[in-house]
């Protein structure tokens, strides 16, 4: 059974990835590969096939910047997702509670209170975490890093499955007191971000409307040219109008002349026939034949 085009391309991509991985694993081959890439780059640059962004026209600059923006956003999103996975794995850490009091009642009460407080803190941080596809804010990442640095490793005796309580307001206040956000002009940064996004969206809308106007202009120009072409053709046809009229009149005259000639000819033939019929002598017992004049 023959493979489809998609299967062939997938096999080709897989073989290319394996080849690149094999080259990267070997230092000598990787150095040779990098040198070849460098020579190819300088060759294309000398030929003028590769240009800097400043040498491009404004349209190509916009296209290049948009592509680079999309690729950087994808890269940053992938990096943040990786960080979030690591944080979700390392965040739920309950430090081991140690109390040196000898009274068993006081020890059990203090341990339960501290364990509940730590559980609420950890659950609040789990609830504060956004989804893996969302963007993490700077303040939240700093607070999570502070919590991760202050927490102790998980002991084998502690039960992780107990961390299932929802985040309450009191626990959030306790966490904010213990781990305050880093001092930063969030309002100013947010206004800058909002203005930049608004500018970008307005520029995008303006570009789309401009493209629509240009499309309508092209359609209008095409229709105008078609109308001009039709007017030119009609003017040319008007020039040949009197010729066509003369031709039709000539044809009609010739047809009427031929009809008149046919009528005259039929009249002559009918007269001759009647004249001959008068000269026929019918005799009894003899064949009737016309006499010669």
Image (tube, rainbow, N blue to C red):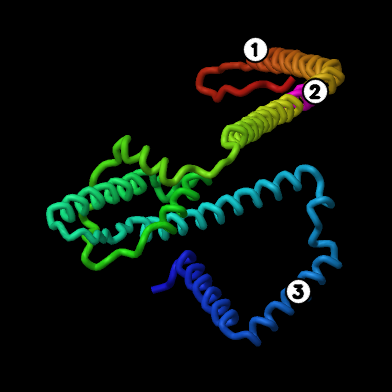
Q: Is residue 170 visible?
A: yes
Q: Do the residues labelled 1 and 2 touch (CB within 8 Å)?
A: no
Q: Residue at x 41, y 57 (%)?
A: 150
Label whose residue precedes the other's in the sequence (1 or 2): 2
In front of the other: label 1 or label 2? 2
**Residue 225: quarter of image:** top right
Looking at this view, name the residue that lies furthest to the left. Answer: 105
Up-down: is 103 above or below 123?
below
Q: Can residue 261 be seen in this view?
A: no
Q: Is residue 160 above or below residue 190?
A: below
Q: What element carries label 3?
A: helix
Classed neighbour count for the residue bearing mark 2: other residues with Cα under 10 Å, few (<14), some (14–19), many (≥20): few
Image spot of residue 19 (x, y percent): 56, 79
Residue tagged by mark 1? 278
Q: In this view, does 94 lie to the left or right of 206?
A: left
Q: Where is residue 103 in the image (x, y as percent from the top left)?
A: 15, 57
Which residue is at 78% across, 75% downward?
A: 39
Which part of the image, by quadrant, shows the N terminus? bottom left
Exactly how many numbered labels are in the figure? 3
Q: Is residue 161 left or right of residue 48?
A: left
For mark 3, what is the residue? 38
Residue that appears at 57% across and 36% down: 186
Counting residues from the start of the chain, the first of labels 1 and 3 encountered is: 3
Question: What whole-number distance in Å separates the C-alpha atoms at marks 1 and 2?
Answer: 75 Å
Residue range in magenta is 223-229
Q: What kind of element bears circle 1?
A: helix
Of 177 and 195, nearer the camera is: 177
């Amino acid at each position: 059974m023959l493979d489809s085009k998609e299967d062939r391309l997938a096999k080709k991509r897989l073989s290319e990835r394996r080849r690149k991985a094999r080259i990267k694993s070997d230092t000598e081959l990787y150095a040779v590969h990098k040198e070849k890439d460098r020579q190819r780059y300088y060759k294309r640059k000398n030929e003028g096939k590769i240009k800097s962004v400043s040498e491009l026209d404004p349209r190509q600059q916009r296209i290049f910047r948009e592509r680079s923006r999309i690729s950087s956003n994808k890269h940053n999103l992938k990096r943040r997702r990786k960080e979030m996975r690591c944080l979700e794995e390392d965040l739920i850490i309950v430090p081991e509670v140690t109390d040196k009091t000898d009274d068993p009642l006081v020890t059990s009460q203090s341990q339960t209170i501290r364990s509940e407080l730590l559980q609420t803190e950890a659950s609040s941080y789990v609830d504060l975490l956004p989804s893996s596809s969302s963007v993490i804010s700077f303040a939240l990442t700093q607070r999570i890093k502070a919590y991760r640095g202050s927490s102790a490793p998980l002991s084998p005796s502690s039960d992780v499955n107990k961390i299932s309580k929802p985040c309450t307001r009191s626990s959030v206040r306790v966490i904010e007191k213990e781990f305050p956000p880093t001092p930063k002009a969030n309002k100013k940064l947010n206004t800058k971000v909002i203005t930049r996004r608004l500018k970008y969206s307005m520029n995008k809308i303006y570009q789309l409307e401009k493209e629509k106007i240009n499309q309508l202009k092209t359609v209008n120009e095409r229709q105008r040219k078609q109308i001009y072409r039709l007017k030119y053709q009609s003017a040319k046809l008007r020039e040949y109008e009197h010729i066509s009229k003369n031709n039709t009149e000539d044809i009609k005259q010739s047809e009427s002349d031929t009809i008149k000639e046919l009528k005259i000819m039929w009249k002559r033939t009918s007269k001759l026939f009647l004249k001959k019929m008068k000269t026929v002598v019918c005799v009894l017992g003899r064949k009737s034949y016309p006499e010669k004049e």
